[in-house]
Image (cartoon, grey):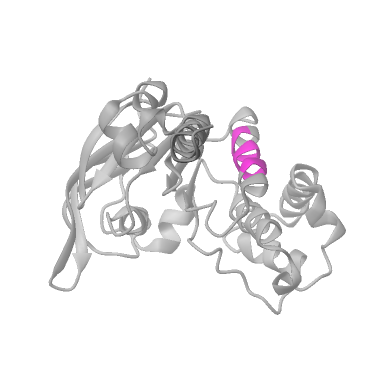
Amino acid sequence: MSALLELDAISSGYGRTPVLHGASLNVAPGEIVALIGANGAGKSTLLNTIMGIVPLTGGDIRFAGHSITRTPTPTIVRSGLAQVPERRQLFGAMTVEENLRLGAYVRTDRAGVAATMEEQFRQFPILLERRHQASQTLSGGEQQMLAIARAMMSRPKLLLLDEPSLGLAPLMVARIMDQIVALRAAGGTVLVVEQNARAALDIADRGYVLENGRITVFGKASELLVNPAVQDAYLGGQGGSLRAIEDRIRAKRKTILGR
């Protein structure tokens, strides 16, 4: 299957500070692809480079068969890319509905926009209940749902998600990940950046590991979950299993207490 998004050895950074060093990845239509790595590895910079927010200094970015290298961000959005930024960046004083309408700023089909809003209310029923509330009054999980729904208002071919689990309780993280899977089931394509490697790889088809601005490991998500290097660095070792960690704690306690 031909790639919807192709990054060919891209480099970028901030002024004289390079961040990405020849990073390459691709996303095929209908996939969920996870990009994992430690804080400061360059994950958000990679997404912002795709969107034209951070200038490219080397390599090429192709989307839907066309180069978007050095293309203005509004043009990139119109071509079918949408990003949910880290920490959501909603307009706090504006209502849920107003935030959603802003997500459709590149569209002129009023009836289509209304239909897409109804689709998002079906996808995220809590937003329908909160449609007239200021977004700053929502919980963290509800704000993340709104940020995703706002991005979907442009009807993107590819959704870029930057740390969707950031600051959320484990139960809400699970709900957000379920929503991402539902988006894919409805025909969407997603590139998700996450520090919560297990949560991202659990829902992804394929994954990439970014370290110090370079892709160091990539493959099927199921393979990365059992890769010893990935386990030790990002999954807590021994498969990253919470049960394994709890078992070690119990064993240590038993040794100390003698029971």
Of the 4 image quadrants, the one containing the N terminus is top left
Name above or below for residue 59 compared with residue 24: below
Residue 242 at x, y percent in the picture: 51, 35
Give the image location of residue 253, x and y in percent. 49, 39
Left or right: where does residue 152 sit relative to residue 24?
A: right
View extreme (front): residue: 258
Q: Nearer the viewer, residue 164 or 10?
A: 164
Q: Which residues are magenta?
A: 174-181
In the image, what residue occupies the spot 41% across and 38% down?
34
Q: Residue at x 18, y 73 (%)?
A: 15
* Residue 115 is a magenta residue: no
- The correct choice, above or below, for 120 with respect to 55 in the image is above
Say if the magenta span includes residue 180. Answer: yes
108 up-or-down from 185: above or below:
below
Magenta region, mostly helix, strand or loop?
A: helix
Asked whether residue 74 appears in the rendered view, the answer is yes
The quadrant in which residue 231 appears is top left
Instruction: Please indicate whether residue 104 sits to the left or right of residue 213 in the image.
Output: right
Residue 67 versus residue 229: which sits nearer the camera?
229
